[in-house]
Image (tube, rainbow, N blue to C red):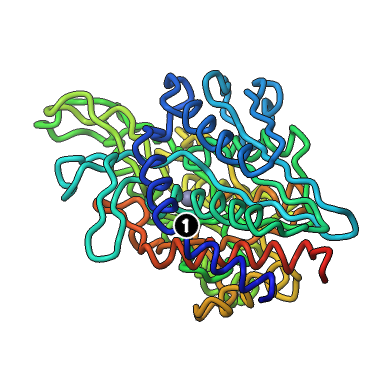
Amino acid sequence: VSLETEVLDDVEGRVDDLIELTAALIALDTTARDVHDPPRDEAPLQELLADRLREAGARIDLWEPRPDDVAGHRMTPAGLGFEGRPQLVAHLPGAGGGKSLLLNGHIDVVSSEPRERWTSDPNAAEIRHGRLYGRGACDMKGGVAAIVVAVDALSSVGARLRGDLTVCTVTDEESTGCGALAALAHGVRADASIVTEPSTLDAWVACRGALIATVTVLGRPGHAGMHHADWRDGGAVNAIDKALVIVDALRRLESEWRSREDYGHRLLPGPDIVATGISAGEWTVSYPASCRLTFHIAYVPGQADDDGWGSEVMADVTRCVDDTAAGDTWLAEHPPTIQWAPEVPPAEVDERERIVRTAVAAGQRVGRPSRPTGFHSWYDGATFTKLGSIPSIGFGPGSLDVAHTVDEFVPIDDLVDCAKALALSAIRFCGTSET
Ligand SMILES: [Zn+2]
């Protein structure tokens, strides 16, 4: 019996454990945070994973990053620390002479609200019709459990990998990406990585970058029941009306971007500028004094600056707002201001990279129609690819269609296929003493 067949059979014998481990991870509350939120169950969850991986023979490094490890980076919000939020690395040294592989997952999940709309408790996993339901089932505690079970299977069949195998689980993917950033700062490296996000076992080879802009538009308060003189004669100005001028202008910028051939991408949608927030109004019978707009901007790798970040996209948006303001008498004299939140970069790996071919072939070997695809949003793989020079792909169980939703689930078959494909990928990518 070949090593590959042996390891596939071994995973098959671990299905109950895979389900129980996913459920145990879901039971721990690791809801994503705002910068100053207190820790939740991040430490117990990482300790649970550390115990499991130690049993499988890994050397464990569980550490709390210092704020300085990530401070001042363009991805990092001011004041971010990691107290009570350890990061985990489990290291399985290879025999030598092979390529090293990193298996990564994030342990934070988005909020379960509105909880009352869930069919079952989001933190008490339930199986219905071959699917395991719960917050984080597919995004991505199922993927993390699949990593652990793949490592267990490799260890139990005695696979002697040539290259190092490293498992790394991080916090803060859903909020800032600073967990993976801290892992890189800690020295995590490999020849390639697989992030087990819910890709339905396709291989994400590209993702978009994202920026968040907050635009503040001024008005001039006045009685809403009165007709007002021209603003130059002291009349009131409605900040909401002026904000809508900016919304229209950014919509035009978005369609301009989308019409550009050099911003087209084979695997990704065109750029988006989505208005995600608006707040204005001091009193129901007053013209609002100001209006604050928030925009989420997703952009393609072709829009990135020479360093791979969003400075040119920011410049485009700023120019658009400035030009629009210049064409409006009030806004020309009361120009809107733009504030930028920390950003995340786009990333792309060549489809011919060995990790892409390895994972796709492993997916197909376990009966899936795996192929290279693009991920519309952003994930930690971009950090490893761009900042760690580790070619990374998203490849994991479940579908993005149900990530972040009420009644999130992961098909149990996906969990099993993922654990199998990961074990095969490790054997094929790292090599074994038999090969
Ligand atoms: Zn995710």
- Residue 160's quadrant in the figure? bottom right
Q: Helix, strand or loop at disc 1?
A: loop
The residue located at (46%, 64%) in the rendering is 416
Q: Residues within 10 Å of mark 1 (few under 14, many from 20)?
A: some
Where 83 sits versus 21, above or below?
Answer: above
How many numbered discs, if any? 1
Residue at the spot of label 1 = 14
Q: Residue at x 72, y 59 (%)?
A: 159
Q: In the rendered image of this protein, does residue 158 appear above or below residue 367?
A: above
Whole-percent x, y for residue 397 in the image: 46, 62
The residue at 75%/65% (across/down) is 429
Q: Is residue 340 visible?
A: no
Query: Horizontally, is 188 left or right of 253 in the view?
Result: right
Quick one: 259 or 384, which is closer to the camera?
384
In-image side of 61 versus 289 (left or right):
right
Q: Quadrant of the N terminus?
A: bottom right
Q: Residue at x 51, y 49 (%)?
A: 144
Q: Position of residue 111 (x, y in %)?
A: 33, 38
Q: Indicate the quadrant where residue 34 lies.
A: top left
Against 99, residue 424 (above or below) is below
151 on left or right of 106: right
